[in-house]
Amino acid sequence: MREYLLTLCITAAVTYLLTGPVRKFAIVAGAMPEIRARDVHREPTPRLGGIAMFFGLCAGLLVADHLTNLNEVFDKSNEPRALLSGAALIWLIGVLDDKFEIDALIKLGGQMIAAGVMVMQGLTILWLPIPGVGNVALTQWQGTLLTVALVVITINAVNFVDGLDGLASGMVCIAATAFFLYAYRIWYSYGIEAAAPATLFSAILMGMCLGFLPHNMHPARIFMGDSGSMLIGLVLAAGAISITGQVDPDVMNLFSGSERETVHQTVPVYIPLLLPLTIIAIPAADLILAIVRRTWRGQSPFAADRGHLHHRLLEIGHSHSRAVLIMYFWSALIAFGALAYSVNSASMWIVLGVVFLSAIGLGLLLMPRFTPRAPRWAEAFVPPRYRRRKVLPAAAAAGPGEPGEGEQEEPRTPVTVGVSGVNGATAVGPRSRAAR
């Protein structure tokens, strides 16, 4: 665990320290997009934050290769090299797209090639644990197609939520934390060395996001751009592929005892099928809704719009910070709920806790629709929006444009506040050229 934490800290430190110089380089290089119709930020903000994140990834892998225990991951598996090869390719495509506009099909093709490069080096799904069927071995073509599909879907799902300051990096960090705890449990508790690469990938991904997040929080000083969003999406997918298709469930020796005990004990076997879906549940839902919405309107599925989940939260009346925190809340609830269920699937308290927290989340979503008014004695302790409207004592006291006696102040029309951070509504969609 100490070596994983050291790798995480080195990755975060390198990413954090390089983001400042990368921001200056992006400004000099002209990688500052013009304000688009669907954007809600007020001034051009440099991109190319993915450059710092990529070098953080390289630093994390380099440090891990020189540590006593983590060095075995590189000796026994080729997956770290496969990840680095695919990440370098997808990062290069993202950098070119942040500076120059790349056609949607070219980006989609690049994503598929990056996934294919990882498959050729051994990072692929070899088998799937199917509930009620058992461990099903896949043919080479089946494993390749499934791996490429998972990589492309994850990359675009992460990029679809990259729409507010700190949103994508924070959500991916939450997902990586849950995935790290799950993979570390499989590696440490069951002694399965095949889970070590996924654990390492998750720790490095956490460091990449944590190092970039201070620069990307509202108001953002730099955006990660497609070079960053596609990169962290690929690393997230690589961890899911590694632990889902490389770890043999039969090695856990869980199939013993009564039928009921076996069902509960084999939950960790089937969780890899669900956990990669839960950690991108919110981005995947946004991706599906966007495709259906645009297709229904007769538009291209890759056409950008302002109908994403984070845009809807702003339209409801949430502030930028609250919208981001709500998305964090739901991501953490889904990811850690699945993680807790994998640890103890027989506990009713876990289910009740998830239900209770879901009710709280729904209440937070609807908060702007119901603005409560505090009693008179508590008005001094609450924000102005929760206080009752004051009534002026006399009409004479009212100046020009002010309400007279018995009149209440007119409710103020909410003003849409500029929100930084629509960093690329789709990983394969077109984007306006950067203004110079």
Image (cartoon, rainbow, N blue to C red):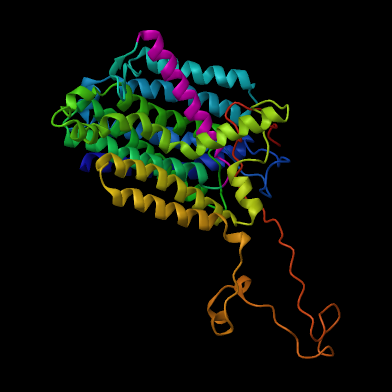
Give the residue furthest to the front.
Answer: 259
* Left or right of residue 325, residue 297 in this image: right
Image quarter hosting the C terminus: top right
Residue range in magenta is 139-164
Question: Percent x, y for residue 232?
Answer: 45, 33
Task: Using the rendered view, name the quadrant where residue 267 is placed.
Answer: top left
Image coordinates of residue 39 in percent, x first then y, are 68, 43
Image height check: is 317 above or below 235?
Answer: below
Residue under the image location 62 percent in, 76 percent down? 387
Residue depicted at x 49% and y 29% = 155
Magenta stretch: dominant secondary structure: helix
Residue 232 visible here: yes
Q: Who is closer to the viewer here, 260 or 216?
A: 260
Q: Position of residue 266 (x, y in %)?
A: 23, 31
Residue 110 sits inside the magenta stretch: no
Residue in the image at 76% along x and 76% along y: 409
Is 254 left or right of 134, judged from the image as shown? left
Q: Nearer the viewer, residue 355 or 282?
A: 355
Q: Is residue 258 left or right of residue 14?
A: left
Residue 67 in view here: no
Residue 261 lies in quadrant = top left
Q: Which residue corresponds to the image point at 82% horizontal and 79% vertical from the top-left?
A: 402
Residue farthest to the left, as pictured: 257
Which image quarter is the N terminus in? top left
Q: Is residue 153 magenta?
A: yes
Q: How many marks?
A: 0
